[in-house]
Image (cartoon, grey):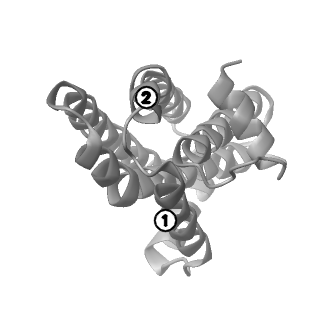
Amino acid sequence: MTVARRKAAHARRGKAEQPHDALVLLTAEHNEIDKLAREFERLRKTGSSVEKGKAALRLCHALERTMTIKHEVFYPAAHAVLADEDKELLRQAAVKDDGIQDLIEKIEGTPADDLSFDSTVTVLHEQAGHLMKQQEDELFPRLRHSHLDLLGTGERMAARRTELGTAPIDRERIRQARNVMAGR
């Protein structure tokens, strides 16, 4: 387990020294996404279509929330402090996020009992996992030693996460969820 993952796990338990460190918060988000993906994999083998659909939608919503936070708060802050060659990592991450968003939209439009549903969710997890690992291994160490205000950025990220978590769900989301779980 990496140092960042240990700190993130520690932060999730509420015992972190700096719970709003941007990199610790993102690592905690990554850990949550991994947990949701493992839950889907478990249900894929033993659960009903409805259970699989719910698990897949939880994974998709967690990924969307994390990508929104990254695009609105984290990437702009990181872009401001990184050198040119390191900014390329941010551009690559943004492109990979677009591919992940395409997969999310496909999942949200596919019934859970469709033959391609499980494979699409698995590919989503693999692509998201690869991106998260790359960020934790390459980008986070560079940012840890940059002039990025990790605490200030983390505070803004935590506030945005709270906003996203308390926003009302729109009717389109509800319709998509019904389609995924009902097989229509």
In terms of image quadrants, where is residue 172? bottom left
Q: Give residue 63's position: percent from left, percent from top.
A: 50, 47
Distance from Cα at disc 1 to Cα at disc 2? 19 Å
- Residue 57 falls left or right of residue 68: right
Of helix, strand and loop, which one carries label 2?
Answer: helix
Disc on the earlier residue, 1 or 2: 2
Of helix, strand and loop, which one carries label 1?
Answer: helix
Say which of marks 1 and 2 sits in front. 1
Neighbor class of circle 2 (other Cα within 10 Å; few <14, some 14-19, many 20+) is: some
Residue 53 image label: none
Residue 156 image label: 1
Residue behind mark 2: 135
Let me know if residue 96 appears in the view: yes
Q: How many marks?
A: 2
Seen from the viewer's position, the closer of residues 32 and 123 is 32
Q: Give residue 27's position: percent from left, percent from top.
A: 59, 38
Amino acid bearing label 2: Gln
Seen from the viewer's position, the closer of residues 91 and 125 is 91
Check the image and report above or below for 170 versus 68: below
Neighbor class of circle 1 (other Cα within 10 Å; few <14, some 14-19, many 20+) is: some
Seen from the viewer's position, the closer of residues 9 and 53 is 9
Amino acid bearing label 1: Arg
Let me know if residue 183 appears in the view: no
- Residue 150 falls left or right of residue 105: right
In terms of image quadrants, where is residue 134? top left
Check the image and report above or below for 144 versus 21: above
Q: Give residue 175's position: percent from left, percent from top.
A: 50, 70
Seen from the viewer's position, the closer of residues 29 and 140 is 140
Tell me which residue sits at (82%, 53%) in the image: 14
Tell me which residue sits at (61%, 40%) in the image: 33
